[in-house]
Amino acid sequence: MAGGWDLFGLGGGLGADPGAVGINAPLSPRQVLAYNHLANLYRPVRTYENDGKPSPESYELAYENVPCRFEIKQSTDIISVIGRLEGDQVETVDNLHVAERQEIDDNWWVKNVSLDIAGNPSTLYGRWWNCRGQPQKFIRSVRRQGGKVVIKVSQEARPPLGIED
């Protein structure tokens, strides 16, 4: 195995052959423990018709089995005398953590493909998230053993029509 770790022995993602789908970036020992999910990443693709008009946006599988950590944000409640009140919140935005050199951007789609230790689908398996905004990069330094990329994502009921899974 050339560089990195193959976290779950599934191939792809970190630790895979550099020519394979995924990205070969080392994780710190702490990240190996924390990045307990695998995800497929889909990037938007725009094609044009013969007359030069853009066709509807579609998506292609960019990376598969990418180790990551979903930081699920619970809906915030306001405690009051009469109980808890739901704030003015249309949707909850979660955080997705991936390796420092993992490519990901706004309007990408993420599908959780994690399995538990027994090989059964995890509790988040098959769920979809849409990336919102630009990713934040935290690069490796003397004080930070492992770099990472964090991007805001919102969970969606189903993927857009342009994704062929």
Image (spheres, rainbow, N blue to C red):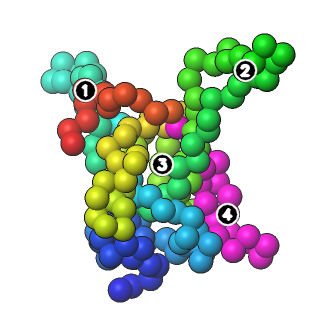
Decide which of tag 1 and tag 2 comes sooner along the chain: 2
Distance in Å between CA atoms under marks 1 and 4: 35 Å
Distance in Å between CA atoms under marks 3 and 4: 15 Å
**Residue 8 picture location, percent across and down:** 37, 72
- Do the CB atoms of the residues marked 3 and 1 lie less than 8 Å apart? no
Q: Secondary structure at mark 3?
A: loop
- Circle 4 residue: 139
Q: Secondary structure at mark 2?
A: strand
Residue 94 located left or right of residue 68: right
Residue type at mark 4?
Answer: Ile
Distance in Å between CA atoms under marks 4 and 2: 39 Å
**Residue 69 picture location, percent across and down:** 53, 55
Q: Nearer the viewer, mark 2 or mark 3?
A: 2
- Circle 3 residue: 104
- Do the CB atoms of the residues marked 1 and 4 lie less than 8 Å apart? no
Q: Nearer the viewer, mark 1 or mark 2?
A: 2
Q: Residues within 10 Å of mark 2 (few under 14, many from 20)?
A: few
Residue type at mark 3?
Answer: Ile
